[in-house]
Amino acid sequence: MAKVKSLAELKAMREKLQSNLDLREKSNNPDAMVQVKVAMATCGIAAGAKQVMEHMMEKADELKLAVVFTQTGCMGYCHAEPTIEVKVPGKDPIVFGHVDNKRADEILEKYVMNNELVEGIIPVNYEKID
Amino acid sequence: MTKIKTHVLCCGGTGCKASASDEIIATFERILKEKGLQDEVQVIRTGCFGFCEKGPIVKMLPDNTFYTQVKPTDVEKIVNEHIIKGRKVTDLLYLDPENKQHVSDSKHMGFYKKQLRIALRNCGFINPEDIDEYISRGGYEAIAKVLGEMTPQQVIDEITKSGLRGRGGAGFPTGVKWGLCAKNQADQKYVICNADEGDPGAFMDRSIMEGDPNSIIEAMAICGYAIGATKGLVYIRAEYPLAIHRLQVAIAQARDYGLLGDDILGSGFNFDIELRYGAGAFVCGEETALIHSMEGKRGEPTLKPPFPAVSGYMAKPSNVNNVETFANIPIIITKGADWFASIGSEKSKGTKVFALAGQINNVGLIEVPMGTTLRDIIYEIGGGIKGGRKFKAVQTGGPSGGCLTEKHLDTAIDYDSLMAAGSMMGSGGMVVMDDTSCMVAIAKFYLEFTCEESCGKCSPCRIGNKRMLEILTKITEGNGTMDDLQELRNLAAVIKDTALCGLGQTSPNPVLSTLDNFWDEYVEHVVDKKCRAGVCKKLMNYVIDKDKCIGCGKCAKNCPAEAISKTNYIAEGHKLPSMEIDTTKCIKCGACMSGCKFDAISIK
């Protein structure tokens, strides 16, 4: 195995390795991050939620956004799958429907980064108990 | 490439391992593979989560779902429900004992809310057998900083400024200790890690070594640089096979990366670590005895001075620190002394790990800032007394410590407040007792331990403790006198003054503190010949309430000594005569009482 010979090398190594623990570090403090919940029930998966989630995760990395992605069960909007719920710290969660790769990019670039609302918002018609 | 979406952290500490956590991990890996999810879900064997009461623990990330008491047969359900469908497996979630609600997020559990994990920062978070995970959390950056930017004196000053005190129990300032050793010139010096954890019930050092072995290696190297030593030795008891294994793995990986060995990080500094195994003798936690044991001599203490800092292992200057102390070092270096000194109480900085045990709901390993009250620890983190019973006492500091009572519940605990209350920090064992514990029997238990573990070198400890134990035995058997109580105090005072080492000097503490705090109970044993907790068998009698007894005769059938027979008395409304116990035949096994469905039998 290659020896680490300096602080710079150690730091470079950390940088390279860090992404492996990213998911764990993020979940240490999820409330401070953008949380995206992807409805991943049968209907969601059939509508392509899995691919959209993959795509969105890559896009978030590309944009260097700190986002926690969670899979959840059916949210009840089977008519608008794939659906995702986006919670930006300090704001109420918003549910987006019919999310494809293009809309996913829009959500990240416009809503998450610039707070512009984009197409596809589903009015929230439920309350949650915690 | 598919991205990993879920991390499954599975506890691989000794406790959870004993409850089949290895099998759980293997099952996860098998089922995930069967379902083609091996690239999306990563299973990690971590160190201890501390919540040993409800082990084995499986924690799902990113949503922090905390599954308790998981069995290998539950794994399929977790995969199908949680991972595939995104639904929580409710019956495996932690059930809040107070409001009977399931808590899914570990951050909302009372057990974790008040904790601050510094020494345990990586335990239950990283895979201890993978140095890469330690490095990706900033590991080995402290040694890099020390070697690149600081002089040895600056390192010592930084540690002194942080206010870190020895976590082994006595609380000697760590920076000062390093400074003493650094002063002495020699061709060879040693850094010694005291991993001979011996207090009954304490297991924080084991958990740190099992959960985050690299932090100890890094800290020892930092210490080596500060005091001018190139050799490190870990004295660890052979009863800790998993901790030994993980340390060995970590040492080998650190050597591969060049983080141990010659010319570390290109600085010209050399440092390497070897393990030394102990046979598990309590006295070998005393630093001079520990050093003798490592040299292959008898594990017996010698008088100080000379201190190990002057003449230690192989008569060379040596610095001995405990595992938990070392675990704090890297983070003090990276985050700074001021950060560390901002946590804790006035004279005790940082946090302390405690092993909660006894009659408490959440048995486990916790870490809190110094100055947290006993009430917070017992009721908030510990979840209160088992079965809703009444709190009676808490024993801290193991065989060197003492018992604290209800009046100490709001004491902010640190080294000094515990000392003032007649106990001590010790290595952090905390045994909680309810009203079913007899304080005389507790004192006797600890003294039995000390007598067993005394090395026998000095007579106060060897003979004095034996005499004290005889008196305590006499009292618990109902033959004690008031003079005996005075004699206990006299003996205790002499042993404290004259014993050779820390073990002997502190061994009367459990007796003294119970005498101080539970005098009434001693008097009851001596004068009334009564044990209110019903623990001292010679002092109690099982009695049948003749009006409650319906005369079914089950107790008589259960009695192995044929001590129960019929009377002539038939209580009002009953058809059969009630039973009675012949106390001369009774062996006090309690079989009658546990079998009685009518609560007619009690202890008097």
Image: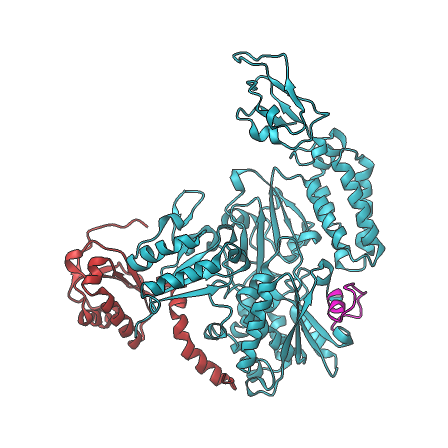
Q: Nearer the viewer, residue B560 or B256?
A: B560
Chain A drawing hue? red
Where does the N terminus of chain B fall, quadrant-wise?
bottom left
- The residue that appears at 64% across and 15% down in the rendered structure is B567
Residue A121 place in picture, x, y as percent: 17, 61
Residue B538, image quadrant:
top right
In the figure, B85 relative to B331: above or below? above
Q: Which of the two residues, B321 or B93, is positioned nearer the viewer here?
A: B93
Magenta residues, as a range?
B289-310
Q: Position of residue B457 (x, y in %)?
A: 83, 59
Horizontal and vertical percent for residue B81? Answer: 32, 55
Colour of the chain lettered B: cyan
**How many dots with numbers?**
0
User: Along the horizontal axis of the image, is B322 left or right of B501?
Assistant: left
- Quarter of the image containing the C terminus of chain B? top right
Q: Is residue B340 visible?
A: yes
Q: Magenta stretch mostly in which secondary structure? A: loop
Residue B280 placement (x, y as % from top left): 69, 60
Residue B332 makes an appearance in the image:
no
Magenta stretch encompasses residue B529: no
Relative to B75, say whether B258 is above or below. Answer: below
- Depth check, front residue: B173 or B42: B42
